Amino acid sequence: MVLHNLWRRATRSFLTLLGIAVGVATVVALGAMANGIMANYSSALGLSNDLLVTQANSMDVVYSNLEETYAERIQAIPDVANVDAGVFSWIAYPETPYFLVYGYAPGSVAMGHYRIVEGKPVMASGQVAIGRRGADALKKRVDDTLRINGQPYRIVGIYETGQGMEESGGVVALEDAQRIAQKERTVSLFQVGLRPGADADLVMARIANLDDELTVTEAAGYSSGEEWTGYLQGFAWAISAIAILIGGLGMMSAMVMSVLERTREIGTLRAVGWSRWRILRMILGEALTLSIMGGVVGVVLGVFLAWLVGQAPGVGVLLAGSVDAGIIVQGMATALGLGLLGGLYPAWTAANLQPVEALRYEGGGATQVTGWLARIGNQSFRNLWRRRNRTLLSATGIGIGVGTLVMLGGMVDGMIGELNGLAGGGGAGNITVMQRDVADMSLSSIDERVVRALHAMPEVTSASPFILGFVSTPDMPMFMFGGLDPNSPAMQHYKVIEGRAIQRPNEIVLGKVAAETYKVGVGDTLQVKDNRYKVVGLFATGVAFEDASGLLALSEAQRLVGRPRAVTFIFVDVADPILAPAVVEAINRRFPEARASISSEFAQSTNDLQSTRGMTEAIRWLALFVGGIVVANTMIMSIFERTREIGTLRALGWPPRRIIGQILLESLFLCLVAAVLGSLIGMGFFTLLTWTPMTGSYLSAAWSVEIFASAFLTAGVLGILGGLFPAWRASRLEPAEALRYE
């Protein structure tokens, strides 16, 4: 009976099922991608040896920074067979924006992990072996030249490991990797091999006792950046929740309509003796059956999407999904949850129908609009309020999708504005210089000798070097600290509101948000990477992530990040702003390893922001698709309940195009209402995010007319696309058949 009832409205059931399937597919695909990234990243870091040693409190292994001299001390521990120092660094190419460079000593145990299938392994400086996927993406072969940060390396071999991230990268000699990553006499990690029969726990304890700066884990169980991967999973679930909410509201709307159109039928069943519990079971069973079918379709679709994304050139390797039983269980649990939540209220409504009132129900038309609503707008607008509950459910579902776009648009624009204004940039005649071909701007590394060369350019009035570092702490999982010369013009950007600016290497000034988070003030001390600094001042810039950071002397920050002769950014001031574009071109010609741009424009072209914009576009399409399903389902339900009314209009001489126009106009009105609601939801969502402990302080938004215009345009497209099929269907109704509709 349940399947029979669902088949009676096959179109509506299919659209509802599709909405559920999209929500479940999003859960499965994003969950698989998050798992895949974690699995791939973890396996890329320690498969050749038994233990892995990294820097304590490092946000990620790429930011880990250990002195080379630790190798000798670890080697001296009993039962340690070998110690292999390693360096990791991300670089970017147009063909593959996430190219991971590994550096190990030639002939080491760690280097043996990369199984050469063509050519030979790396045996000397200036050589590189690249993975199979990297070779295919870059169209490189053995004996070709690969440029890394402008320096040529001869490809001596192609390797395979069976791991996508590894095979999309390259392996070089340790000294070359240190040069690429600007790690002078420091490394990212140590791989430690044990002698047969060694007590791993005892060795780990002895290594940890060498220095508080060391963290030791078993290589097989290492998960890089647990905080980072936790945020990744949280993000996946947050995006999935959007599709789930929209799908759930669509399900509830469909089931409510199913109950309404079957009011007389339910009344008859109650009159012949069906109990309320039996009615509730029937309606809830329909909802659960529909959700299970949608769940199965969604799981299959999600697995396919995860595979498809993994095949995409460039970023595919980073997003390659890993599907396990847990992901499938999550998907089906999501589907069942949608069925239960979406069907519970309609089932309860049906169970509580009084037989006498239900049998008197005439069907077809909805509640007549009266009062002030009857005096505003046109007929299309008033028709929406004839089923207010359904309209509000549908508008809320669409509004959540639109609101997500508003929130992300404001967040991205806010991020761009803040990054463009970093350390006072963004003004007339200001130029930002960073490393070219870097996967993440935080990994930018430029030889500080470039600063002196820029100073010497006649058009340049100042060149301020700036270095960026990160550390993970219990209070702030991502505490950012910067390094500036105390006499640098860029120091003026950090407006000291209490105390004074830094003067010595053992001093730090904190942003007001960081000071509040750590509960410290002027005169207190703050520990950063096992180093204690006196807080001499507090600053406020109005930039969210800067106010949650700290500022050290340039030389001290360089020492902390292990780059004593490198900087992250150089902020260049030009006397005549008109000459700034020419100076940018001159810098880019003279320093091929660097990328200069006008500060007010530099963030937009970085790899980070390009990836973020790609993510935003993907969410936009998700919202369009799921929202379109909700609109189409809503309008189809409206047509079903107004079949006799439409038949009457057709009998009175309304042509098909007028019927189409009426339905499309209603669809547009619905989506415009959703756009207004979505704009409020988006701003509300963002406000809630800023209240999130620890991470909220890094967020800021920039609201613009363009963002809201895009939201309304998206809603308009939804209205047209979602209303087309229902409008066409309504226009095809024959008057005689429509008037006989019960």
Image (cartoon, rainbow, N blue to C red):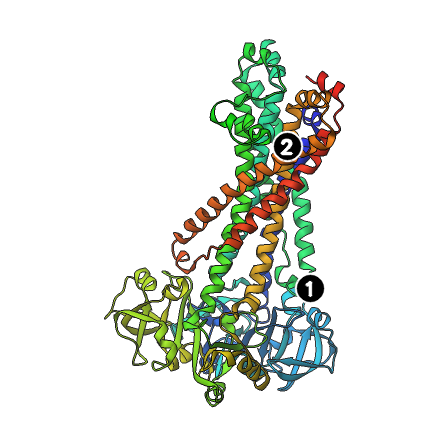
Question: In the image, what residue type sits under mark 1?
Answer: Pro
Instruction: Give the CA distance from mark 1 to mark 2.
Output: 39 Å
**Which quarter of the figure has residue 104?**
bottom right
Asked if disc 1 and disc 2 are in contact, CB closer than 8 Å, the reply is: no
At 51% across and 59% down in the image, what residue appears? 412
* 291 left or right, relative to 494: right
Question: In the image, what residue type sits under mark 2?
Answer: Met
Q: Which residue is nearer to you in this view: 569 or 454? A: 454
Residue 82 visible in rendering: no
- Considering the image in quadrants, where does the C terminus appear? top right
Residue position for label 2: 635
Residue 715 visible in rendering: yes
At 61% across and 48% down in the image, what residue appears? 622
- Residue 417, above or below 28: below
Packing grade of label 1 (10 A; few <14, some 14-19, many >=20) is some
Provide residue 533's location: percent of width, then percent of height: 30, 74
Residue position for label 1: 313
